[in-house]
């Protein structure tokens, strides 16, 4: 899987720019606030339709413009392909094109351009709250399994509606009559999410343990545990079994949900833990151990996606190397001999021997070697 070229018009701080990429390592250099991360964001968005920074599509459109246009040429699935997005600054729905044909959903472009993003914030993901760890899972699974993304969107929609019922029932008590319907549907879709996540985390844990074994010189044993609602005794059980166990958990929280006016239990609270030789990394891990484990997770995600699709996803490293000591830098770089990599860096002379250097300044391509 290779991104050959990307063309941006009115995206973030880019007015009009075209960049050709090397099939190996691409080093994006420039001072701070010039648009390096914006370029990585564009690459990530091109394949997934998701921004790792923006909450609203309108934030991606250049200030003062009505629309943004992203287009890229990709070698994927053993053929040349083209993806294009047109984004609008108002409420108008975005437009998706694959090989010139308009598509309705992101599921119709799944697998064309897969990416794995690693940014400085990810280095401490194992010490942060549960939300970033769920996001790591959701972003990977949405690329690997289009049905997962559809289920996740449906679950979030139902969850939002249920929370609205719980909040509005004071003014309209009759709303509680339809609450069981929402609970049933929430458990049906939630069971699917748990089933997908259990298998993803099992694979991710195996791959990450292998990387961490080499990284630590075999000194520490890496293990990952998926955490979901307590009534789910086996997340690998049939979906119908998971659905019943979710129902049981919801029923036990009925009074508490009425008092809090919010849905308190379900896959939207899922998390995962990492232990090193039986010791909780979140509670007792040093900064070095946490960073090493985070690197192992990201490299594991890349490996897992390669085994699923037969192609390495494009690896995006957003200024992450400058956050690592030389030993960890070397470990990461030694693991990316295959596949395409795009790295941003503020220090032009630091990694210039890696591959092609692309210099960005004030939203423009200054140098392309």
Image (spheres, grey):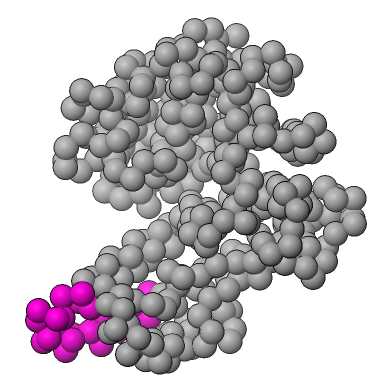
Q: Which portion, as a residue range, is magenta?
A: 165-189
Residue under the image location 27 percent in, 33 percent down = 86
Note whether residue 322 is visible.
yes
**Is 167 positioned to the left or the right of 309 in the image?**
left
Main SS category, magenta section: helix
Residue under the image location 40 percent in, 59 percent down = 149
Note whether residue 306 is visible.
no
Above-or-below relation of 332 to 174: above
**Is 75 positioned to the left or the right of 124 in the image?**
left
Q: Position of residue 159 (x, y in %)?
A: 30, 71
Figure quadrant of the C terminus = top right
Residue 176 sits inside the magenta stretch:
yes
Figure quadrant of the N terminus = top right
Q: Position of residue 342 (x, y in %)?
A: 59, 29
Q: Position of residue 231 (x, y in %)?
A: 52, 88
Identify which residue, 81 or 354, lies in the foreground.
354
Above-or-below relation of 324 to 259: above
Above-or-below relation of 154 to 260: above
Above-or-below relation of 149 to 341: below
């Amino acid at each position: 899987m290779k991104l050959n070229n990307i063309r941006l018009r009115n995206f973030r701080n880019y007015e009009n720019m075209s960049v050709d990429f090397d099939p190996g390592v691409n080093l994006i250099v420039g001072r701070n606030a010039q648009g390096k991360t914006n370029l990585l964001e564009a690459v990530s968005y091109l394949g997934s339709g998701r921004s790792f920074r923006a909450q609203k599509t309108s934030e991606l459109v250049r200030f003062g413009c009505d629309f943004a246009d992203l287009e890229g040429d990709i070698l994927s699935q053993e053929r040349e392909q083209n993806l294009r997005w047109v984004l609008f600054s108002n409420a108008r729905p975005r437009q998706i094109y694959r090989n010139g044909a308009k598509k309705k959903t992101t599921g119709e472009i799944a697998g064309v351009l897969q990416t794995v993003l690693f940014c400085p914030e990810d280095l401490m993901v194992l010490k942060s709250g549960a939300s970033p760890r769920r996001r790591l899972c959701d972003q990977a699974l949405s690329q690997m399994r289009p049905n997962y993304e559809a289920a996740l969107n449906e679950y979030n929609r139902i969850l939002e509606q249920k929370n609205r019922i719980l909040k509005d029932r004071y003014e309209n008590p009759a709303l509680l009559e339809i609450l069981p319907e929402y609970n049933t549907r929430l458990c049906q879709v939630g069971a699917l999410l748990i089933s997908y996540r259990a298998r993803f985390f099992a694979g991710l844990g195996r791959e990450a343990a292998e990387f961490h074994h080499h990284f630590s010189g075999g000194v520490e044993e890496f293990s990952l545990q998926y955490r979901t609602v307590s009534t789910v005794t086996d997340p690998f059980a049939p979906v119908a079994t998971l659905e019943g166990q979710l129902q049981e958990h919801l029923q036990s929280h009925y009074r508490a949900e009425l008092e809090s006016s919010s849905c308190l239990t379900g896959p939207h609270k899922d998390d995962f833990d990492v232990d090193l030789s039986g010791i909780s990394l979140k509670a007792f891990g040093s900064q070095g151990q946490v960073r090493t484990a985070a690197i192992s997770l990201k490299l594991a995600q890349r490996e897992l996606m390669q085994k699923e699709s037969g192609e390495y996803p494009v690896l995006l490293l957003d200024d992450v190397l400058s956050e690592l000591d030389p030993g960890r830098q070397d470990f990461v770089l030694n693991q990316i001999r295959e596949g395409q990599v795009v790295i941003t860096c503020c220090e032009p002379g630091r990694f210039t021997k890696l591959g092609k250097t692309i210099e960005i300044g004030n939203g423009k391509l200054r140098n392309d070697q």
